[in-house]
């Protein structure tokens, strides 16, 4: 709750990081405000910057955050973390609450509380990496409530959910599959009987003979390119190396034009001629013998 520096508090607010039961009991002891008290505190904060008034508004609505957080326990995230994120949303709501609109703070704040919890879940829950659009987020947070039981959705149910949430049926099927998935540790634990993916997933490039063949092939290709470069005149070799053989910050045609005192078009012509000469050198019989045979498709 200390994350919102724009709403300083003269006294520490209860934190959900310790005993959760103790925290819930504490926040439930804070009295609810009457409509008149709520308006008075809100006006004092908006007009006079009275942080103690803002503190009273926050304290009286902490139980709301606890209640909302219970609805998101099915996502496997810590209850205390959900509450803390919701408390941030509550403070944002208090900061923006205008009593002149005639709406109670609880109705206004619940949207901010849920928004912060949604963002926290989307940042941390493994299955929501694809929930980037507004429609996908709506699908993610509503699919569980729309499903009846644990059985997979039928084709008719998929169409109904897609129509209700204004998404494609394919997106409903994909999200349901992700919701039903489970994470598996790649290396498993220290149990001798564990059978983790590391034990049965093979690396196709881990065979020593294949690694040696790949290293030799790369060496031969490098030597062939070096011989082709050596056949060029110094200026052409400089242009090809600066344009194509740097790992980063490759030179532009205008850079080389300034270096050699010619036009960029002349550099392009020299480059094209040099590349054609290198191509012929690499296609020569001795170069073809140096290079490994291409893999069969």
Image (cartoon, rainbow, N blue to C red):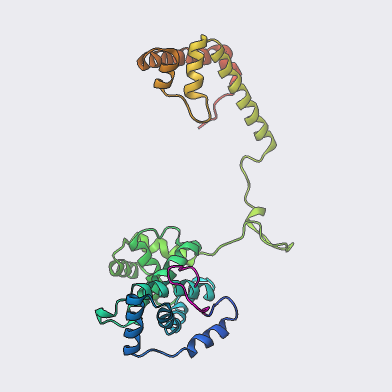
Position in image of residue 61 (x %, y %): 42, 83
127 or 160, which lies in front?
A: 127
Position in image of residue 266 (x %, y %): 37, 13
Residue at the front extreme? Answer: 48
Position in image of residue 98 (x %, y %): 29, 76
Instruction: Indicate the quadrant where residue 264 lies.
Output: top left
Residue 8 covered by magenta stretch: yes
Position in image of residue 249 (x %, y %): 49, 29
- The residue drawn where x is 31% and y is 89% is 36
115 or 271, which lies in front?
A: 115
Task: State the extent of the magenta-drawn residues as a range.
Answer: 1-13
Task: Please tell me how many numbered marks the rendered image carries.
Answer: 0
Q: Is residue 215 visible?
A: yes
State the predominant SS element of the stretch in magenta: loop
In the rendered structure, the answer to whether residue 75 lies left or right of residue 167 reads right
146 or 123, which lies in front?
A: 123
Vertical placement of residue 3 versus 205, above or below: below
Residue 232 covered by magenta stretch: no
- The residue drawn where x is 62% and y is 22% is 220
Vertical placement of residue 172 versus 149, above or below: above
Q: Is residue 146 visible?
A: no
Residue at the right extreme? Answer: 192
């Amino acid at each position: 709750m200390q994350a919102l520096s724009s709403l300083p508090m003269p006294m520490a607010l209860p934190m959900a990081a310790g005993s959760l039961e103790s925290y819930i009991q504490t926040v439930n002891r804070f009295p609810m405000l009457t409509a008149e008290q709520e308006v008075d505190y809100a006006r004092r904060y908006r007009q006079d910057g009275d942080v103690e008034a803002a503190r009273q508004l926050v304290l009286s609505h902490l139980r709301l955050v606890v209640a909302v957080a219970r609805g998101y326990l099915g996502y496997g995230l810590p209850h205390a973390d959900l509450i803390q994120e919701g408390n941030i949303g509550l403070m944002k709501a208090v900061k923006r609450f205008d009593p002149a609109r005639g709406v109670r703070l609880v109705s206004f704040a619940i949207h901010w509380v849920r928004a912060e919890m949604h963002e926290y879940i989307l940042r941390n829950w493994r299955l929501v990496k694809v929930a980037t659009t507004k429609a996908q987020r709506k699908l993610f947070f509503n699919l569980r409530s729309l499903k009846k039981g644990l059985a997979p959705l039928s084709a008719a149910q998929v169409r109904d959910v897609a129509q209700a949430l204004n998404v494609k049926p394919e997106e409903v099927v994909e999200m349901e599959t992700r919701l039903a998935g489970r994470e598996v540790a790649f290396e498993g634990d220290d149990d001798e009987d564990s059978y983790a993916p590391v034990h049965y997933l093979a690396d196709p490039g881990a065979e020593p003979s294949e690694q040696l063949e790949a290293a030799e092939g790369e060496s031969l290709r490098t030597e062939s390119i070096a011989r082709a470069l050596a056949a060029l005149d110094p200026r052409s070799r400089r242009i090809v190396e600066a344009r194509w053989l740097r790992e980063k910050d490759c030179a532009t045609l205008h850079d080389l034009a300034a270096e050699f005192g010619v036009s960029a078009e002349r550099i392009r012509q020299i480059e094209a001629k040099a590349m054609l000469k290198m191509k012929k050198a690499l296609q020569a019989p001795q170069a073809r013998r140096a290079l490994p045979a291409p893999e069969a498709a």
